[in-house]
Image (cartoon, grey):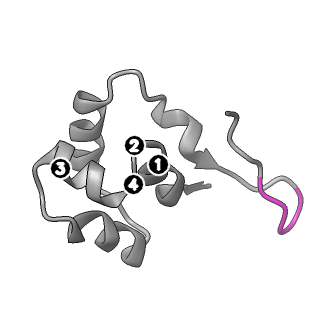
């Protein structure tokens, strides 16, 4: 199972907007993408500024072999 960081950032208005919302450098979201990792601390902060965001919808898992499930819109 993987976490779709790219979609999360996009749904929050993009890297620049999300960085502004979190009051961090705009390089921070790019770092998450580069490392394919986002800490629970940032996920909590994102949830605070976007309370209606369903974090669970960004988890994607394998169906059969290389096919991945897609999050619902």
In terms of secondary structure, where does tag 2 sit? loop
Q: Identify the magenta region.
A: 64-68
Does the stretch in magenta take in 32? no
> Which residue has dot 4 on it?
14
Residue 12: % across, % down: 39, 43
Residue 20: % across, % down: 17, 50
Which image quadrant is residue 49 in? top left
Tell whether 16 sits left or right of 58.
left
Distance between the Cα atoms at labels 3 and 1? 15 Å
Does the stretch in magenta take in 66? yes
Which image quadrant is residue 32 in? bottom left
Residue at x-position 20% and y-position 43%: 21
Residue at x-position 33% and y-position 23%: 51
> Which residue has dot 2 on it?
12
Q: Main secondary structure of the magenta part?
A: loop
> Which residue has dot 1 on it?
8
The reply to whether discs 2 and 1 touch (Cβ–Cβ < 8 Å) is yes
Distance between the Cα atoms at labels 4 and 2? 6 Å
User: Which label's residue is closer to the chain start, 4 or 3?
Assistant: 4
Q: Residues within 10 Å of mark 2 (few under 14, many from 20)?
A: some
Which image quadrant is residue 47 in? top left
> Which residue has dot 3 on it?
20
Identify which residue, 29 or 60, lies in the foreground. 29
Tell me the tag on residue 61.
none
* Quadrant showing the N terminus: bottom right
User: Which label's residue is closer to the chain start, 1 or 4?
Assistant: 1
The reply to whether discs 4 and 2 touch (Cβ–Cβ < 8 Å) is yes
Residue 39: % across, % down: 28, 55
In terms of secondary structure, where does tag 3 sit? helix
User: Which label's residue is closer to the chain start, 3 or 2?
Assistant: 2
Q: Is residue 50 above or below residue 29?
A: above
């Amino acid at each position: 199972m993987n976490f779709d960081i790219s979609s999360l950032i996009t749904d929050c208005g993009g890297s620049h907007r999300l960085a502004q919302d979190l009051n961090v450098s705009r390089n921070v979201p790019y770092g998450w993408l580069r490392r394919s990792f986002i800490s629970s601390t940032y996920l909590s902060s994102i949830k605070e500024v976007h309370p209606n965001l369903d974090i669970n919808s960004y988890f994607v898992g394998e169906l059969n072999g290389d096919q991945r499930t897609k999050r619902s819109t």
